[in-house]
Image (tube, rainbow, N blue to C red):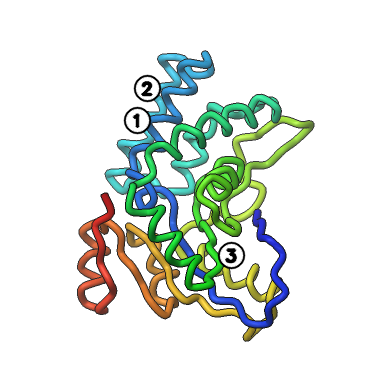
Amino acid sequence: MEQLLEDSRAQVAIAAIDVDGTLFSGRAAQTVFLRILRSEGLLSRAAFARLVAIHVVHRLGLMDSVAARRGGLAALDGLPLAQAELLAERLSAELLLTVRRDARPEIAALRARGLRIMLVSASLGLVVRRLAEGLGADGYLASELLIVDDRWRAAFAGPVVEGHQKWLALSRFADDRFGRGGWALACAYGDSPDDVALLERAEQAVAVNAHRKLARTAARRGWRRVAWR
């Protein structure tokens, strides 16, 4: 669920960055994912229609995000792990090309300040790990699918890292890795209300291309707001 480079310092300043909607358009991952599944022959027309229906129902607020993710991942049920690795490699490579051009200089500036960069996302670890590597992040926290007999199942192996789970995952990991009091969340970046649990606990909160509700929250709390291109 997590990976971080070795660090011998007693005090660590962390920058937590959301992925979907923050580093690239919120629709980018879904669009690329569906196109790759179709091109690989892993998504029939009927399956595509089901995924679209799930997306619409979720957008209308009639299905919670965890159920929507499980429904969307049904297309991967039983997929051999080796094939899943290849799909993740292709998906992450394409997503890295869509990263907002203002994101990379920001990450470089954070690193120059000595911060440890963590990607924190509800997306799949197999993909987020590669994004972290491609962006030069120090580590990641993400959702993981259950693996049985070297095959992916349409079920999560642990909590989905969204909402309050983002903060819980980060704080538990950092406490284990650096010890209580040995780290601080120096800054956090997010685009939606799903990221508030991280943003409100950061010394500096940054709302990136914020959704309407988060934009109002950021304005009320005096958080920094940016529009990354």
Crowding near pointer 1: few (<14 within 10 Å), some, many (20+)?
some
Q: Residue at x 45, y 21 (%)?
A: 47
Residue 125 x, y percent position in the rendering: 59, 46
- Decide: few, some or many residues near mark 2? Use Cα within 10 Å; few <14, some 14-19, many ≥20: few
Furthest-right residue in view? 149
Residue type indicated by callout 3: Ala
- In front of the other: 74 or 7: 7
Where's residue 207, x and y in %? 30, 64
Residue plotted at (20% across, 68% down): 216
Q: Which residue is mark 1?
A: 53
Gap in angstroms between the C-alphas marked 1 and 2: 6 Å
Query: Which mark's residue is nearer the viewer, 2 or 3?
Result: 3
Q: Amino acid at mark 2?
A: Ala
Residue 208: image location, x then y, percent: 30, 59
- Residue 49 badge: 2
Q: Earlier in the sequence, mark 2 or mark 3?
A: 2
Query: What separation in Å lies between label 3 and label 1 (alpha carbons)?
Result: 30 Å
56 or 94, nearer to the observer: 94
Q: Residue furthest front?
A: 112
Element on which disc 3 rests? helix
Q: Give the structural element (helix, strand or loop) at label 1.
A: helix
Name the residue beneath numbered marker 3: 169
Q: Secondary structure at mark 2?
A: helix
Task: Note whether 47 is above or below 2 in the view shown.
Answer: above
Q: Amino acid at mark 1?
A: Ala
